[in-house]
Image (spheres, rainbow, N blue to C red):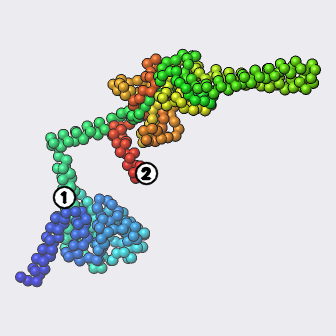
Amino acid sequence: MTDTNRDRASGLGRLLQLENDLRSAPTQDRLDFHCVNQAHRLVPFRQAVLWWDDHEVPQALSSVPVVDRNTPYVLFLRRLYSYLKSRATAPFRPDPAHCPESIREQWSRWLPDAVLCVPCQDPVSGQVRGLLLVAREESFADYEVRLLHRVAGTAAHARQYLRLSASSKWSKTWRPSKKKALVSIGVLVLIGVLALPVRLSVVAPAEVVPESPLVVRSPLTGVVDEFLVGPDEPVTPGTPLIRLDDTKLKNQKAVAEQSLRVLQAEYQQHSQRAFSDRDSSAKLRGIEARIDQKREEIAYLSELLSRVIIRADKAGIVIFESPDEWVGKPVELGERLLTITGLTQTKLEVRLPVDDVIAFDASEPVRFFPTANPGQSVQAKLHRMQHSAEPVADGFLAYKLYAIFSAQNQAPRVGLGGVAKLFGERVPLAYFLLRRPIVKTRQWLGL
């Protein structure tokens, strides 16, 4: 084999190897790398630039791993591409003398004398997909132009194959089947169900309390002797409720009455002597003042004794703890003893935990489920809410809300406990189910 034949065989092998590398490139980046770097083994050049799909920023540069679109060299190539793309219908050698002034002034700085522009045409459709620019100091021979044109066409065909292969994989992945269709329908149904609007609601412990209770307080300082009524007993105005111990007051009154009798006898003696004894006449006025004082004291003690029996001022139900805790207990003036509430004047007290506070809808009724009859609910209307939370008997911080029963004649009795259900705005079902976990997560993360 002669040297000429050997060189031709070697060149043909390099061409076939390069075409094989281009067609078997697994990714677009690998394909671009072969175009601007491996083609140098087939046709020597100093630098190469590759554009695709009318993007003025090059997709690949020879000997450059990553293209920085803001470097002076790339900015020059962007202006150059705007000039070349309309003329790249076939391989040609651009002349800097015919370029715009902004390109011509920087040509010698970035490119050598010999420049070849080769369109990347799809061999099947003939459509130009991109542009390959190669440059070196020596002029390109005709056979080199033909080789680079073939390489550019092979690259365009391989790139089109990569795109079709990717879309084919996507279509295969989403190829409809009975199982996938059922899964898709199930997912859509689940999303639809989770997006359904539902009324946000919370449940909190509640108790029926008096609406406007009358507080009965001790009218004097003393000791509780006897409770004349029992807890939850109905009373009428004037009904005796409590009797205080009157022993001390009776003794004080008896002593005062005896003192009054002594003063009256003394006054009688001095009044008889006043005609002849000036000293007795002078003492009469002092004795009169002491007699008036004793009479006032007796009247005061009589008034206190009239208060020993505490009576009801209004009709209602008596509310207090066990009377055994009060009998024999000393009480001070004004100390609270019991409460009287109307037979139908009740309201609902709801103890809402801090974590369950929502934006309430005042137009929605509050539903109360008594513990004695959980299957029955009583409606009430939200009246007011406490501004600050406070510890409650259940051991947690809660806001107190008060609701008025819609039908007072059907209101539960005072002291009846249960749970109340309060309603807020409409929210998606997903938020309704995940509200508690979201609140706990935010508290744990401190958001």
Q: Amino acid at mark 2?
A: Leu
Secondary structure under tag 2 reads loop
Residue 432, quarter of picture: top left
Q: Amino acid at mark 1?
A: Tyr
Q: Is residue 45 visible?
A: yes
Provide the residue designation for mark 2: 447
Residue furthest out toward the left: 1
Q: Which mark is residue 258?
A: none
Secondary structure under tag 1 reads helix
Q: Residue at x 40, y 23 (%)?
A: 378
Q: What percent of the width, then of the height, locates residue 384?
A: 51, 31
Residues under numbered marks 2 and 1 in contact, where contact means CB atoms less than 8 Å apart: no
Q: Residue at x 87, y 26 (%)?
A: 283
Q: What percent of the width, then of the height, locates residue 78?
A: 37, 65
Sooner in the amino-acid sequence: mark 2 or mark 1: 1
Q: Residue at x 42, y 69 (%)?
A: 102
Q: What percent of the width, then of the height, locates residue 187?
A: 24, 41
Height in image: 27 above or below 304? below
Nearer to the camera, 93 or 195 = 195
Provide the residue designation for mark 1: 161
Q: Is residue 150 left or right of residue 337?
A: left
Nearer to the camera, 51 or 431 = 431
Q: What percent of the width, then of the height, locates residue 134?
A: 28, 72
Q: Is residue 27 left or right of residue 242?
A: left
